[in-house]
Amino acid sequence: MARGAEGRITRGTTGTNRLRRVDRWVARLPALRRTPHPLVVDLGFGGSAATPLELHRRLAAVNPRVEVVGVEIDPGRVRIASASAVPGVSFRVGGFEVPTERRPTIIRAFNVLRQYDEHEVPDAWRRMTSRLTEDGTLVEGTCDEIGRVCSWVALGPAGPRTLTISLRLSGLELPSIVAERLPKALIHRNVPGERVHELMLALDRAWRTNAPLGVYSPAQRWIATARTLAAAGWPVRDGVARWRLGELTLDWDAVAPARL
Ligand SMILES: C[S@@+](CC[C@H](N)C(=O)[O-])C[C@H]1O[C@@H](n2cnc3c(N)ncnc32)[C@H](O)[C@@H]1O
């Protein structure tokens, strides 16, 4: 581990195309488009260069001047990944202090805090968000091995703003499958008395209620599920264009743990 790097080396499991859902969500952040030369950090990229390279390819379609830096606390992994560097993508050793010269517009930290303790989350969030540009976003979350069940918190410099759930709808039995892949701040809070538990129950109820729409498509059933939640007062963001992808974004306050 490099001296001064904040955090610790954890398992480096990663995979090609695993983070496609969060890449797609990041690609629509307005700051990415309007910043002339945005810096994006893929923090904790793991055992190969796959996710920073994919992130760059997907974001460059939106802003060709985007630069992606893969930051990893394990110097051995940085050495391996560096052999795959291409224009616009580089790799360096570091931790939550995010040791880039410029401030990043986006920091994506996926499947990193999952291997930490819950009480370490607020400080890690603070360290990373303190490095963002004023209009920057930290995207911190978790997914399964093949990226079909994902969720993430989006934070600005002042703290958490939203929770997003993103699921492959085809073959989905119950949306609460995401309970196993919630961000560290929420994963231990799926218990009575916590708001995220209420959300899991409400999602499953709405998914079941809207089962008949599955005849048309799982996307129609999910869109109706999002509408049911919104009608029940959940602060659901966006609209049909996002919902049809199996996404659902809610205001953080609606799910924030009782105490973090
Ligand atoms: C499970 S891998 C995730 C790889 C990739 N992000 C993904 O989702 O497929 C987690 C990686 O995060 C790294 N890591 C853990 N804490 C870190 C920190 N504080 N700063 C940078 N990297 C860290 C670990 O060394 C490990 O390689």
Image (cartoon, helix red, strand yellow):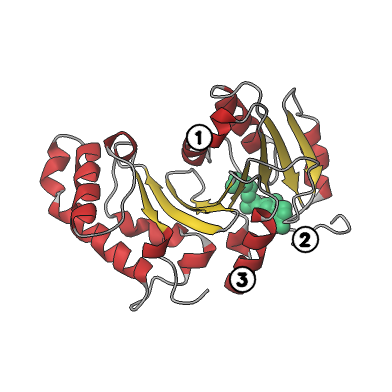
Image coordinates of residue 43 in percent, x first then y, are: 68, 47
Image coordinates of residue 51 in percent, x first then y, are: 62, 37
Asked if labels 2 and 1 touch by Cβ distance under 8 angstroms, the answer is no
Indicate the secondary structure of the residue bearing disc 1: helix
How far, Cα to Cα, is label 3 from label 1? 32 Å
- The correct choice, above or below, for 48 with respect to 178 in the image is above
Residue neighbourhood size for the residue with mark 3, other residues' Cα within 10 Å, grouped as few (<14), some (14–19), many (≥20): few
- The correct choice, above or below, for 258 with respect to 28 in the image is below
How far, Cα to Cα, is label 2 from label 3? 15 Å
Where does the N terminus fall, quadrant-wise? bottom right
Asked if labels 1 and 3 touch by Cβ distance under 8 angstroms, the answer is no
Indicate the secondary structure of the residue bearing disc 2: loop
Q: Residue at horizontal 24%, vertical 62%?
A: 202
The residue beneath circle 2 is 6
Q: Say which amino acid is labelled 1.
A: Pro
Residue neighbourhood size for the residue with mark 2, other residues' Cα within 10 Å, grouped as few (<14), some (14–19), many (≥20): some
Indicate the secondary structure of the residue bearing disc 3: loop
The residue beneath circle 1 is 30
Q: Which of the marked residues, 3 or 1, is nearer the chain's N terminus? A: 1
Q: Residue at horizontal 44%, vertical 54%?
A: 162
The residue beneath circle 3 is 117
Q: Within the image, what quadrant is residue 54 found in?
A: top right
Q: Say which amino acid is labelled 2.
A: Glu
Q: Mark 2 or mark 3: which is in front?
A: 2
> In the image, is 55 to the left or to the right of 201?
right
Image coordinates of residue 159 in percent, x first then y, are: 55, 59
User: Mark number for residue 9?
Assistant: none
